[in-house]
Amino acid sequence: MKSYGIRGAASIEGDSVDQVDAAVSKLIDEILKKNGLTEADLVSILFTCTNDIHSVFPATSARKFGLKNTPLICAVEMEVPGSLPLIIRALVTCQTEGNFIPTHIYLGRAKALRPDLSINES
């Protein structure tokens, strides 16, 4: 087994529990599906948010999604002038066998963060 990091990010349009829950659920679902992973493959997830998100921890939203056994933690992104507002980022660490090439997922306005990695249609 080898360890891999998968990056992802999603945007929300307003700071609410429903918006964060929906964005985190979609982000985690896309990361798992596009990479052929299950929760058993996950080592941990680090979530970060821009400082304009206060309604709920993304980790709480991930638990609602169904991640019950994966260690999760949240942090606040640095304030950099001109950075995108209302963004949730994730760094997923997983373990898998074979020739694994991570597919990184960027949703909504977050696609602008890494256009070179934004291959999905969401």
Image (cartoon, grey):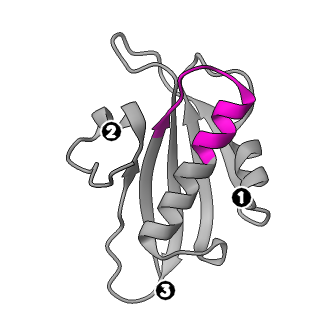
Circle 1 packing at 10 Å, graded few (<14), some (14-19), many (20+), is few
Earlier-in-chain disc, 1 versus 2: 1
Q: Is residue 5 left or right of residue 28?
A: left
Q: CA distance from mark 3 to mark 2?
A: 30 Å
Q: From the top left corner, tell me how far across and down residue 91 is, in percent.
A: 50, 51
Q: Kindly indicate whether the residue at mark 2 contacts the one at mark 1 (C-beta within 8 angstroms).
A: no
Q: Amino acid at mark 1?
A: Pro
Please tell me whether residue 49 is drawn above or below residue 10 in the rendered image: above
Q: Kindly indicate whether the residue at mark 2 contacts the one at mark 3 (C-beta within 8 angstroms).
A: no
Earlier-in-chain disc, 3 versus 2: 3
Q: Nearer the viewer, residue 6 or 109?
A: 109
Residue 12 covered by magenta stretch: yes
Q: Is residue 18 left or right of residue 2?
A: right
Secondary structure state at the residue bearing disc 3 = loop
In front: mark 3 or mark 2?
2
Q: From the top left corner, tell me how far across and down residue 20 is, in percent.
A: 65, 34
Circle 2 packing at 10 Å, graded few (<14), some (14-19), many (20+), is many
Q: Where does label 2 land, which residue?
A: 111
Q: Where does label 1 land, which residue?
A: 71
Please tell me whether residue 31 is drawn above or below residue 18 in the rendered image: below
Q: Amino acid at mark 2?
A: Lys
In front: mark 1 or mark 2?
2
Q: Where does label 3 land, which residue?
A: 1
Q: CA distance from mark 1 to mark 2?
A: 26 Å
Secondary structure state at the residue bearing disc 2 = helix
Q: From the top left corner, tell me how far across and down residue 107 is, in percent.
A: 42, 42
Q: Which residues are magenta?
A: 10-24
Circle 3 packing at 10 Å, graded few (<14), some (14-19), many (20+), is few
Q: CA distance from mark 1 to mark 3?
A: 19 Å
Q: Amino acid at mark 3?
A: Met
